[in-house]
Amino acid sequence: MSHQPDNYSTTQDNANLTAPAPHRGGHNGAPLEKDFTNGTNGMAGGYHQHLDASHGSDEALRRIQTAGSISISPELFEKIYLSPQNRIHGDLRRTFGNPTPLALIGFLLSLSPLSCDLMGWRGAGGSGAAGIASYFFFGGLLMILGGLGEWVIGNTFPFVVFSSFGAFWMTWGGTLQVQFGAYSAYATDPANPATGITSQGFQASFAFFFLAMALMCFIYLICSLRTNITFFFIFLTLVIAFSCLAGAFWNTGNPARASKLLVVAGGFTFVTCACGWWIFAAIMLASLDFPIQLPVGDLSRYVKGASEKKATKEHDV
């Protein structure tokens, strides 16, 4: 059987990064406008290049615009988009800016202070109520905008992750707002709605939301095995943190244990933030073609995709 392009090789048609590779022969057997099977495209200078993590994003885009056939390493693609390389029609990734760092900074500027609040640093506390505005405008707004941007350019996994966490931050901020009535319905003193936030009924009920978030992050954790090590550790620590938060809210009758679980949750989300700041810095440096590049640990080369395995099997036949 003739050799097929590998999963990370994309033939360029009109400088389209994500267009499917052309098949030999066009309509009624006529040759395609660009056929690189024989190493040329019917024009002078047809050639193939390979881009890997040593190339900055600007240099990569310049080569994509001029090259006949380009293959991009998974590590470079995932450093920019936090997603296994996929193929979509159109050239939206070259038309729009990368929305990934926008969503990441919204996540980090919400979770970093909350982590310190949960650990009680410098006398902080109150379940992070001081950061309500940041939960809405950074965590909620920026993450949903980033998620929509990922949707536009065809990156399903980051789109779902960022949008769901944007909704989480809006939910958390709304819950802490007395106008939403989330905890005031449980208030033991009608004149003081704040008494409801410490009631057993409210905390036991809200703990199920944290448990559902832990389950969601566990699914993301499995999916992240196709991305990179940094993303994997972000979800691993979030699974533990949300589980600890659920445990803390279910231990209202044991304040000492609940307090310890909140501190543990804050410690794990602090590690989450450390990983998040690392990957944010890596993406920003790559976006400016900075001479220093940060590795994020590509995992897709170890956990092969179903289509890649199928292509390998067909090639071996």
Image: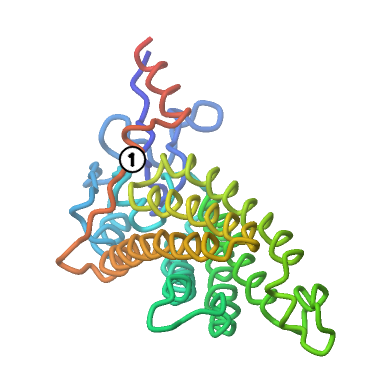
Tag 1: Cα neighbours inside 10 Å, few (<14), some, or many (≥20)?
many
Residue at the extreme left of the image, as rendered: 291
Residue 95 showing in the rendered view: no
Q: Is residue 136 left or right of residue 178?
A: left
In the foreground, 249 or 174: 249
The x and y percentages for residue 198 are: 68, 73
Q: Residue 300 sits in which quadrant?
A: top left
The residue located at (34%, 52%) in the rendering is 230
Residue underneath mark 1:
299
The residue located at (61%, 59%) in the rendering is 164
Q: Is residue 271 left or right of residue 26?
A: left
Vertical relation: 316 (above or below) 271: above
The x and y percentages for residue 259 are: 51, 66
Residue at the extreme bottom of the image, as rendered: 191
Residue 231 showing in the rendered view: yes
In the foreground, 120 or 133: 120
The x and y percentages for residue 15 are: 38, 54
The residue located at (38%, 83%) in the rendering is 122
Q: Residue 60 sits in which quadrant?
A: bottom left
Kind of residue at disc 1: Leu
The x and y percentages for residue 75 are: 29, 47
